[in-house]
C-alpha cells in the first residue's frame, strides 16, 4: 500500500523517531546554553551587588568613626569654651597677655639679663 496523501517530514533514509530525537537533543542543548548564560549573568549581578554592599558597609563604618571623633571634639571644645568664660581665665589672660593689673597692684617688669647690654659690653 502506498500512502499517496502523506508526506514524510524527515530526510530520506531516516525515520521520524530519529528526526525527533535529533531535534530534541538540539533543543535541550540550546536550553542548557541559555540557562548557563542566564546563570552566569545572575552570578555576575549578584557578585556586583555584594561588592557594592561591602563597599557601602566600609564607608558607613568610616563615617560612623568620623562622626564619633567629631562628637568628642565638640565636647572638648565646649569644655574649653566654658573654661574660657570663667572669671579666673579672663583675669589670667589679662595679666599675662595684656600686662594688666588689678587696682592697687603694681606691675614690675624685669629685663632679661642680656637685654640691657650693648654689643661692646659696657651697658650703654
Image: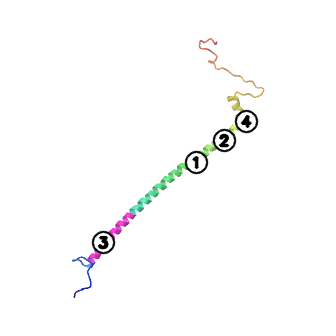
Secondary element at image label 3: helix
How many marks the image carries: the answer is: 4
Relative vertical location of residue 43 with respect to residue 15 in this rendering, above or below:
above
Residue at the limit of the structure toward the bottom, as seen here:
1
User: Marks 1/4: CA distance?
Assistant: 33 Å
Read off the residue under disc 1.
67
The mark closer to the camera, 3 or 2, is 3
SS at circle 2: helix
Instruction: Please tell me how crowded label 2 is: few (under 14), some (14-19), or many (20+) other residues with Cα within 10 Å.
Output: few
Label annotation for residue 87: 4
Q: Of the two numbered discs 3 and 4 on the same chain, state the one appearing first in sequence.
A: 3
Q: Where the N terminus falls, by quadrant?
A: bottom left
Tell me which residue sits at (36%, 66%) in the image.
34
Residue 37 screen position, x and y as percent = 37, 63
Precedes in sequence: disc 1 or disc 4: 1
How far apart marks 3 and 1 lie (CA) works out to: 62 Å
Q: Are marks 2 and 4 in contact (CB under 8 Å)?
A: no
- In the image, is 36 to the left or to the right of 50? left
Residue name at image x 72 percent, y 35 percent:
88
What type of secondary structure mainly makes up the magenta span?
helix
Circle 1 residues within 10 Å: few <14, some 14–19, many ≥20:
few
Distance between the Cα atoms at labels 3 and 2? 81 Å
Residue mark closest to the camera, 3 vs 4: 3
Q: Position of residue 40 (x, y in %)?
A: 39, 61
Q: Are marks 3 and 2 in contact (CB under 8 Å)?
A: no
Q: Quadrant of the C terminus?
A: top right
Which residue in the protein does label 2 denote?
79
Q: Which residues are magenta?
A: 17-38
Residue at the image position 43 percent from the left and 58 percent from the top: 47
Q: Marks 3/4: CA distance?
A: 95 Å
Amino acid at each position: 500500500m502506498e500512502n499517496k496523501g502523506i508526506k514524510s517530514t524527515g530526510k530520506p533514509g531516516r525515520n521520524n523517531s530519529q528526526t525527533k530525537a535529533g531535534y530534541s537533543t538540539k533543543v535541550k542543548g540550546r536550553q542548557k546554553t541559555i540557562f548557563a548564560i542566564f546563570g552566569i549573568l545572575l552570578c555576575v549581578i549578584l557578585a556586583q551587588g555584594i561588592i557594592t554592599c561591602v563597599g557601602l558597609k566600609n564607608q558607613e563604618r568610616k563615617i560612623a568613626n568620623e562622626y564619633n571623633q567629631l562628637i568628642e571634639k565638640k565636647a572638648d571644645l565646649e569644655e574649653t569654651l566654658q573654661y574660657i568664660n570663667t572669671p579666673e581665665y579672663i583675669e589670667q589672660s589679662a595679666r599675662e597677655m595684656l600686662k594688666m593689673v588689678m587696682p592697687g597692684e603694681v606691675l614690675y617688669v624685669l629685663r632679661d639679663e642680656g637685654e640691657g647690654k650693648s654689643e661692646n659690653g659696657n651697658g650703654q
